[in-house]
Amino acid sequence: MPVPTDEVERRVSQLATSLRGSGLRLTHQRLEVAREIAADESHPDVETIYRGVRKRVPTISLDTVYRTVAALVDLGLVGRVNENPGPTRYDANRERHHHYVCTRCGLIRDVYSDTLNGIEAPEQVSGLGTVESVRVHLRGVCKTCERKGNDSER
Ligand SMILES: [Zn+2]
Ligand SMILES: [Zn+2]
């Protein structure tokens, strides 16, 4: 399920505006890295972003991708996701959302829910410190992995 084109364009223009505002030069390569993250709902890691951008910009280096992603994270435009062991994944969706995570294949999908948004931190947490956000991680086995599991049992 790809991110809808108008949503990708909205995210890319947001990223471009903020990059420009930060004083970072908005090169074609940086913009393509931003586009790749914005269009990929899978929460890609750097290698995956690199493979995607290379299809459009064959001359781009892995190093440029690393540095651009790091800059986008520093600017708060892209979030780091560490739901699973393995390389850090990146998230260009800045809307309030939660994550569904497959514990077998590492799939990460965005989940929108007013019910989950409404969850309040328990009283006991106030003893630990302030709470800025509450994010729910739903873990389980995705449909694809479930199907694979059933096939191998036969
Ligand atoms: Zn899975
Ligand atoms: Zn997400």
Image (cartoon, grey):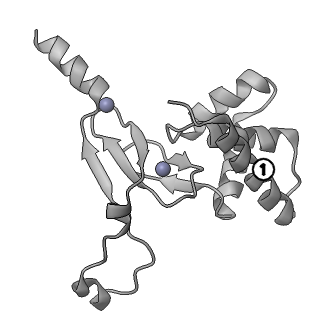
Tell me how many marks there are: 1
Seen in the picture, residue 147 relative to 103 is either above or below; the reply is: above
Which residue is drawn at the image coordinates 34% and 70% (left, top)? 118
Q: Is residue 83 visible?
A: no
Residue corresponding to mark 1: 13
Q: Nearer the viewer, residue 86 or 28?
A: 28
Query: Within 8 Å: ligand 2 and the Cβ of disc 1?
Result: no
SS at badge 1:
helix
Amino acid, disc 1: Ser
The part of the image, by quadrant, that contains residue 4 is top right
Which residue is drawn at the image coordinates 29% and 50% (left, top)? 138
State the residue lying farthest toward the front. Answer: 114
**In the image, residue 79 lies at what x, y percent?**
56, 56
**In the image, residue 45 lies at what x, y percent?**
54, 40
Q: Is residue 37 left or right of residue 44?
A: right
Seen in the picture, residue 129 relative to 10 is either above or below; the reply is: below
Q: Quadrant of ligand 1?
A: top left
Task: Point out the image quarter for the C terminus.
Answer: top left
Which residue is drawn at the image coordinates 49% and 61% (left, top)? 96
Q: Is residue 142 left or right of residue 98?
A: left
State the residue lying farthest toward the left. Answer: 154
State the residue lying farthest toward the top. Answer: 154
Q: Is residue 20 left or right of residue 93?
A: right
State the residue lying farthest toward the bottom. Answer: 127
**In the image, residue 92 lies at what x, y percent?**
60, 50
Instruction: Give neighbour class at mark 1: few <14, some 14-19, many 20+ (Cα, 10 Å).
Output: some
Q: Is residue 119 visible?
A: yes
Which residue is drawn at the image coordinates 55% and 31% (left, top)? 2
The part of the image, by quadrant, that contains residue 21 is bottom right
